[in-house]
Amino acid sequence: MNVVAEMLLTEPAPLAIWVTLLLAATLSVLALAGVDGVRDPHLVVLDAVPYLRRRREQRARRRRDAEHAVRYADELVVAAGRAARVASQWREHCRQSEEHTATAWQEWQDAEQRLAVLRAASAFAMPAARTPAEYADRERFLHRALGAAVDRGDLPAGAAAEALAGHGGWNPWLHPVEQERAVQQAVAAHRRALHQRAVMAEKAARHDARLAVATRDSLRQETAVAVVRAGAVRHLAPALRHRPASRSRRAVLAPA
């Protein structure tokens, strides 16, 4: 019996250490390679290398997925913030359109009231111009009345030009009372057309504002989900791990 065997038989402590090390090595080999690996030690190396490669690829894939989730959440935060600003702008535009429509309606009603007064005043037929000088006075009166209406915004600029060119149905032979009524009829028609255009513009603004709000709300919901997912995997993205939620992100996720 050699010295090592005699020491193991006479001293129990070294024997216990050797047995413990042998048992740990056996369990490690079984865990890595299974029973076949115990029969053939080469299988341990052949199985361990692909296993380690798969583990490394899985870690890399998880890191890429985490980085993608974090970047996607950040991009959604920016998009949601932009959508919130656009929705706010469209709501303001819609409010202004409503005010413009109300103003246009009131101006149309005022024009109709003035026309009703002039109709009552010109219920009787007025004498036509009898001399060239009287005709010239009535023509100048018509041009002044049209120019004043254009300056007030009651008529488009082309109305005065049409009268000067003898177009548009303007009759300088009429009595000034009748001319004023004709001008006011044109004003009422113009104000009515402006009100109709304002109503159409308001409808379009409301439609666009609803779309903008719907887009904002949809992006907010998607952003909230993406931010939660990014927070759960942020620790797997070393390059993006220390990027905290910004003030704009909290503002985007806050209710309107």
Image: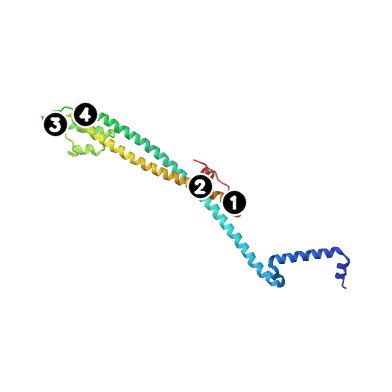
Where does residue 231 sit, x and y in percent of width and height? 58, 50
- Mark earlier in primary sequence (4, 2): 4
Q: What residue is disc 4 on?
A: 119
Q: Nearer the viewer, mark 4 or mark 3?
A: 4
Real-space Cα distance between discs 3 and 1? Answer: 88 Å
Q: Is residue 81 left or right of residue 149?
A: right
Q: Nearer the viewer, residue 146 or 96?
A: 96
Q: Residues within 10 Å of mark 4 (few under 14, many from 20)?
A: some
Q: Residues within 10 Å of mark 2 (few under 14, many from 20)?
A: few
At numbered mark 2, what does the secondary structure look like: helix, strand or loop? helix
Point 31% across, 40% down: residue: 197
Where does residue 152 sit, x and y in percent of width and height? 28, 33
The circle drawn on residue 232 is: 1
At numbered mark 1, what does the secondary structure look like: helix, strand or loop? helix
Q: What residue is disc 3 on?
A: 135
Real-space Cα distance between discs 1 and 2? Answer: 17 Å
The amino acid beneath tag 3 is: Tyr
The amino acid beneath tag 1 is: Ala
To which quarter of the image does residue 24 belong? bottom right
Q: What residue is disc 2 on?
A: 221
The amino acid beneath tag 2 is: Gln
Real-space Cα distance between discs 4 and 2? Answer: 61 Å
